[in-house]
């Protein structure tokens, strides 16, 4: 029998094993590569005590730098007006008996109709002043209501004036003591009770004899004087009535024969006003001759001295007719001028044409609303900025529509509407036009002079402040060459008030 041959080792198995090993190696390598790529995006586990960032830090990006910008200074701002205050004044509330009697209505006195048509013009001002040419003694004190020569009126006249927009009543005039001490003190009491201001008479010697009134942030010093009718140095008399010894130091009164005493006293009050903060000054003065259409020599002389003392505005009364306006130049300070109206005429009265032998025309029916505007600049300086004057006619209505005394504001550009606005007859419109013409004929020249100077002063002031802000080299050059003269010149460039 025969033997089978021995079986040999197979090479196929080895090859398979090698392939598997290679696949494992490739797979492992791919896994390692993937793990390496994923590491930056994986959170890193922190052990207690470690203070690692949540993410691995990356290289900071390059900062973008902006080109530097030039710092531009704000443009200069010239000094400018920051506040204005307009004061309107009117003349004598002269309460004759017919004016009182016609206003007795329904068992009481009602004087509202006097001011009905001027209320809009009065309230348009920031502050309004009228001269109360009567006393308020009350019939309970033994005085009857009366007109000339000794005036005593119901309290309701003050209510009507307040309701019309007046803020101050002047109680320094030749009729302020017509009902003696009782009437004078009670008049002050009623005015104060209605929360109105007053100047002329005060209630006690402890009170200041002037008022510094803040109006829209501007302090206006105001004072009122009246002339005396007794020339003896040891007495004071008003309307021929001696003022009691206890009252003579309560009134601002001057004696035409002792004007130096008046000037010295006024100068003291002006200094006190300034110490109390007054930035501009107004003086109300009762003076002159009744029914004269032009100021007399005393008025001219006194006005010039008041201007020299530095008062900005003079407002006159007493003649019962309108008198001229004037622009006065100080003889001691070439930079100072004063606006002056010598008389405002009547606000209301029964002085009608034909009622007086002293005057044959209707000028006693005429009055004004006289306005002055003060302005304050951002540097604190105050100036008289402008002035104006509105003629007013005292109209006695007896045309069947009721008996009244009305103050009619004569806006001439509205004359075509007066017939309807004032409920007039055609002939009455013509009388109103004549009143306007009379007043403007008296005041026009002086009013134009004052307005022209004030406008030129305003324009020069604005130019000065503009140059100071935008062209300072003008003043710097002058200062380098001649410091003292430059300061003077620069100051003079700004018109004084």
Image (spheres, rainbow, N blue to C red):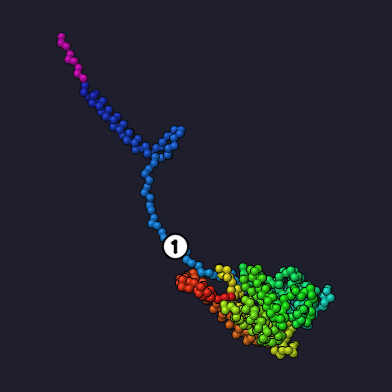
Specify the farthest residue to the left. 2
- In the picture, measured across the screen, residue 111 lies left or right of residue 456, that is right
Q: Nearer the viewer, residue 164 or 319?
A: 319
Look at the image and tell me whether residue 318 can be seen: no
Magenta-drawn stretch contains 156: no
Which stretch appears magenta? 1-9
Residue at 70% from the left image edge and 84% from the top image edge: 288
Q: Nearer the viewer, residue 319 or 481?
A: 481
Count the marks. 1
**Quarter of the image containing the C terminus?**
bottom right
Q: What quarter of the picture does the N terminus occupy?
A: top left
Identify the main secondary structure in magenta. Answer: loop
Residue nearest the viewer, comparing 23 with 333: 333
Eyeballing the image, is 41 above or below 177? above
Q: Say which residue label 1 marks.
A: 72
Residue 399: horizontal and vertical position, in percent? 73, 84
Q: Position of residue 268 (x, y in %)?
A: 67, 73
In the displayed structure, 405 sits above or below 275; it is below
Mark 1: secondary structure: loop
| Left or right placement of residue 438 versus residue 62 in this view | right
């Amino acid at each position: 029998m025969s033997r089978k041959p021995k079986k040999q080792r197979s090479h196929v198995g080895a090859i398979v094993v090698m392939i598997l090993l290679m696949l494992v190696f490739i797979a492992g390598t791919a896994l390692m590569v993937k793990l390496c790529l994923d590491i930056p995006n994986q959170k890193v586990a922190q052990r207690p005590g470690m203070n690692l960032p949540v993410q691995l830090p990356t290289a900071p990006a390059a900062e973008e730098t902006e080109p530097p910008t030039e710092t531009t200074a704000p443009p200069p701002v010239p000094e400018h007006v920051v506040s204005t205050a307009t004061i309107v004044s009117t003349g004598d509330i002269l309460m004759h008996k017919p004016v009182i009697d016609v206003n007795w209505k329904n068992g009481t006195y009602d004087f509202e109709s006097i001011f009905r048509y001027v209320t809009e013009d009065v309230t348009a001002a920031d502050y309004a002043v009228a001269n109360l040419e009567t006393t308020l003694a009350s019939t309970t004190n033994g005085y009857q209501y009366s007109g000339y020569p000794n005036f005593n009126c119901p309290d309701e006249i003050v209510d009507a004036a307040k309701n019309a927009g007046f803020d101050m009543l002047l109680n320094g005039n030749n009729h302020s003591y017509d009902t003696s001490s009782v009437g004078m003190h009670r008049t002050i009491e009623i005015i104060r009770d209605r929360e109105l201001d007053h100047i002329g008479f005060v209630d006690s010697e402890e009170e200041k004899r002037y008022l510094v009134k803040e109006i829209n942030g501007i302090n206006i010093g105001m004072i009122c004087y009246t002339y005396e009718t007794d020339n003896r140095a040891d007495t004071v008399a008003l309307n021929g009535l001696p003022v009691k010894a206890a009252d003579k130091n309560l009134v601002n009164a001057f004696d035409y024969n002792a004007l130096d005493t008046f000037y010295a006293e006024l100068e003291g009050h002006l200094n006190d006003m300034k110490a109390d903060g007054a930035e501009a000054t107004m003086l109300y003065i009762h003076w002159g001759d009744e029914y004269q259409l032009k100021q007399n020599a005393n008025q001219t002389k006194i006005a010039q001295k008041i201007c020299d003392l530095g008062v900005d505005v003079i407002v006159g009364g007493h003649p019962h007719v309108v008198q001229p306006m004037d622009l006065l130049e100080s003889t001691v300070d070439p930079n100072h001028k004063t606006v002056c109206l010598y008389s405002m005429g009547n606000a209301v009265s029964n002085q009608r044409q034909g009622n007086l032998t002293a005057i044959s025309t209707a000028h006693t029916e005429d009055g004004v609303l006289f306005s002055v505007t003060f302005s304050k600049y951002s540097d604190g300086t105050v100036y008289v900025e402008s002035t104006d004057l509105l003629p007013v006619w005292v109209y006695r209505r007896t045309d069947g529509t009721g008996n009244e005394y009305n103050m009619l504001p004569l806006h001439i550009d509205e004359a075509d509407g007066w017939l309807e606005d004032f409920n007039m007859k055609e002939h009455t419109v013509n009388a109103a036009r004549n009143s306007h013409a009379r007043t403007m004929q008296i005041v026009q020249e002086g009013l134009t002079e004052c307005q022209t100077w004030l406008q030129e002063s305003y324009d020069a002031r604005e130019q000065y402040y503009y140059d100071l802000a935008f062209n300072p080299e003008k003043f710097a050059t002058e200062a380098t060459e001649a410091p003292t003269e430059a300061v003077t010149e620069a100051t003079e460039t700004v018109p004084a008030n």
